[in-house]
Image: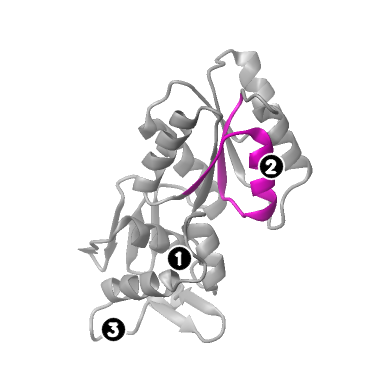
């Protein structure tokens, strides 16, 4: 899942981004509202952590513009971050189009939990646990297993598996995966997607099993859906 953190306080934005990257998210950072609007038009994001008070245009206006002119592929979820804690301020933020509201200062654990809830809405998941056939992934505990055996995954492999499981049965191109699972620092001309898919596939499968992630020649990759896995 790809997240945009928007805050004019560079140290705070970078700290939040670092914490979320450790949990396997692909994270970009914008230090102002105008920068955020530019990025949203050219890069698909699953969620935006949006500061309310910024010097160029505030978070309310950014949120309104995103809702009024959603990018191709649909508008991302918006989690408003602000030091303003009055009920009226929260109502204003939600009315502007925010999906949730978190008051500063906040613990990274609470931010992560709010993000998981918002992203589960898109994936139509009722809990932090995603199940696809024998695969079980717990986003809260950051654990994954296959047929009861725990998987030893890197943060990027975990993020890639989470995305595959949230889109089981769908063919996902390398370009699509690069946009949603990697951040802006990824080199689009490398084979990083192919290599990471390959290592994940090897960790998912015993030698005598058919691959759970199959290659669709000329199109991308697909995690076999529930019916075919059972």
Classify mark 1: helix, strand or loop.
helix
Q: Which residue is identified by label 2?
A: 37
For label 1, count other residues whose C-alpha is less than 10 Å away and answer few (under 14), some (14-19) or many (20+): many
Classify mark 2: helix, strand or loop.
helix
**Pick the front one: 88 or 130:** 88
As drawn, is 87 to the left or to the right of 134?
Answer: right
Label 3 and label 2: CA atoms lie apart by 46 Å
Q: Which residue is identified by label 1?
A: 164
Q: Which residues are magenta?
A: 27-52
**Pick the front one: 3 or 9:** 9
Mark toward the viewer: 2 or 1: 2
- Is 14 a magenta residue? no
**Pick the front one: 63 or 228:** 63
Classify mark 3: helix, strand or loop.
loop
Look at 39% across and 47% down and name the residue there.
21
Mark toward the viewer: 3 or 1: 1
In the picture, the quarter occupied by the C terminus is bottom left
Label 2 and label 1: CA atoms lie apart by 28 Å
For label 2, count other residues whose C-alpha is less than 10 Å away and answer few (under 14), some (14-19) or many (20+): some
Q: Residue furthest right?
A: 68
Q: Which residue is identified by label 3?
A: 209
């Amino acid at each position: 899942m790809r997240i945009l953190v928007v805050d004019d306080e560079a140290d705070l934005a970078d700290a939040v981004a670092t914490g979320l990257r450790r949990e396997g998210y692909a994270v970009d950072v914008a230090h102002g509202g105008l920068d955020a609007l530019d990025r949203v038009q050219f890069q698909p994001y699953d969620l935006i952590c949006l500061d309310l008070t910024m010097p160029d245009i505030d978070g309310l206006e950014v949120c309104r513009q995103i809702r009024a002119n959603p990018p191709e592929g649909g508008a991302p979820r918006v989690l408003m971050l602000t030091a303003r804690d009055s009920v009226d301020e929260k109502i204003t933020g939600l009315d502007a189009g925010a999906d949730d509201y978190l008051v500063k200062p906040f613990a990274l654990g609470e931010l992560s939990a709010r993000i998981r809830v918002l992203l589960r809405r898109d994936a139509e998941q009722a809990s932090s646990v995603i199940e696809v056939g024998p695969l079980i992934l717990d986003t809260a505990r950051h654990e994954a297993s296959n047929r009861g055996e725990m998987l030893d995954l890197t943060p990027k492999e975990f993020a890639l598996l989470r995305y595959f499981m949230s889109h089981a049965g769908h063919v996902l191109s390398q370009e699509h995966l690069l946009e949603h699972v990697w951040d802006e620092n990824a080199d689009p001309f490398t084979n990083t997607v192919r290599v990471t898919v390959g290592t994940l596939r090897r960790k998912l499968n015993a030698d005598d099993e058919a691959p759970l992630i199959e290659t669709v020649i000329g199109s991308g990759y697909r995690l076999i859906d529930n019916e075919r896995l059972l």
